[in-house]
Amino acid sequence: MRLPTTTSYANAVSWSVIGGLALACLLLSHALGFSVALARAALPALGVAVLTGALAIGRMRADTRLVAGATAFLQMTLFTILGVVLAYLLAAFGGPSWDEWLAVTDARLGLDWPAILAVADRLPVPILLVAGLAYHSLVVQMVGCIVVLAATARLERLRTAVAAAIVAGAVTILLSGLLPAVGNLFDPAHYRTLWPSVAWQDRDLVLGLRDGAVRELDLSHMTGIVSFPSYHAALPVILFWGLYPVTRLRVPAAIWAGLTIVATPLFGGHYGVDVLAGLLLAVLALAVARRLAAKAPDLSGMRWPVRHARPMPRTTGRIRWKQGAEVIH
């Protein structure tokens, strides 16, 4: 009998981080008095159930591509739900805002945001639309990366990319709790073509979490409230790394990832230092995930002893039944 080749540790790390996030959410929500709007949690629960079913089907059919793809989708779905919830819970702790420090750091980097926004406001509307589409397509980018890598049987790279995305996201959420910030806000009413950034739209939610006005979690409408570092800068780098072996997609993926990163301050309301920190975090997360993806010793060539059942002794004669017992003559 031969054992199958041992898989990498990246998958186990992803599940471990998800489990840690779930435990942290349970403990903090109880301590802070948060509740969940159960009626609005049906859709996320349905999505998790469908992905779990797809994973079960893949295992029954021994379809490695379906198993890897369903696992990646399930991991990213659970991570997204738990990560946003944890970000909300950490924001509820309050603490001093780091917006002033982030703005000063941007200024030292030579980033004059009023001037940058004025230039962006004069850009042609189609350019802004494409940039906005790139920024808001992050979920689509993740879905595409998972589908392509699973379909082309690049399963180890898929597991590594997902592990890097989850590790980077977890670090982002934890740092956002330590360095809370509302974001690099600008009033869209003062501009001709620029529309409200995500940070501008979510400012009331962030303030409500900080002052205690928001204590119910609506899982049907959740948004990222993290400022530093920027996950919108980290994730495109990780996804591009995942798709890099696919030659036909290499250039389009690089262009779209770059456009997403450039558009992040404008449409996400991020500081420049948020983006730089996100890029650095992506590199570190990929390094960690690739190290974790190193395979354990291959045991497929080892032969393992198999115990065979002892043969029953041959008997002769008649078999008769007596008081329910078998008697051999």
Image (cartoon, grey):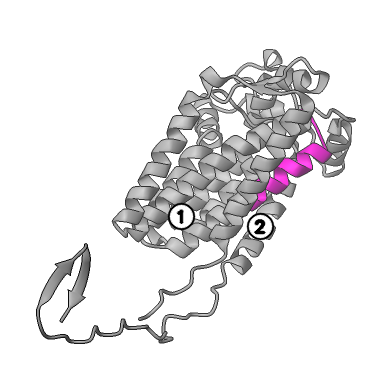
The residues bearing labels 2 and 1 have C-alpha atoms spaced at a distance of 23 Å
What SS does tag 2 mark?
Answer: helix
Tell me where residue 25 appears, x and y as whole percent. Answer: 69, 36
Majority SS type along the magenta span: helix
- The residue identified by callout 2 is 285
User: Which residue does the image show at 39% across and 37% down from the upper left?
Assistant: 50
Q: Is residue 273 visible?
A: no
Q: Are marks 2 and 1 in contact (CB under 8 Å)?
A: no
The quarter holding residue 163 reads: bottom right
Q: Amino acid at mark 2?
A: Ala
25 to the left or right of 250: right
35 to the left or right of 294: right
Tell me where residue 47 appears, x and y as whole percent. Answer: 44, 34
Q: Which quadrant is the N terminus positioned in?
A: bottom left
Compared with 282, 8 (above or below) is: below
Near-viewer residue (102 or 325)? 325
- The residue identified by callout 1 is 251
How many labels, in total?
Answer: 2
Q: Is residue 168 magenta?
A: yes
Residue interval drawn in magenta: 167-183
Mark before the other along the chain sequence, 2 or 1: 1
What SS does tag 1 mark?
Answer: helix
Dot in front, 2 or 1: 2
Q: Is residue 79 visible?
A: yes
User: Which residue does the image show at 54% across and 34% down from the upper left?
Assistant: 131
The quarter holding residue 174 reads: top right
Near-viewer residue (169 or 277)? 169
Compared with 23, 237 (above or below) is: below
Tell me where residue 14 appears, x and y as whole percent. Answer: 58, 54
Q: Which quadrant is the C terminus positioned in?
A: bottom left
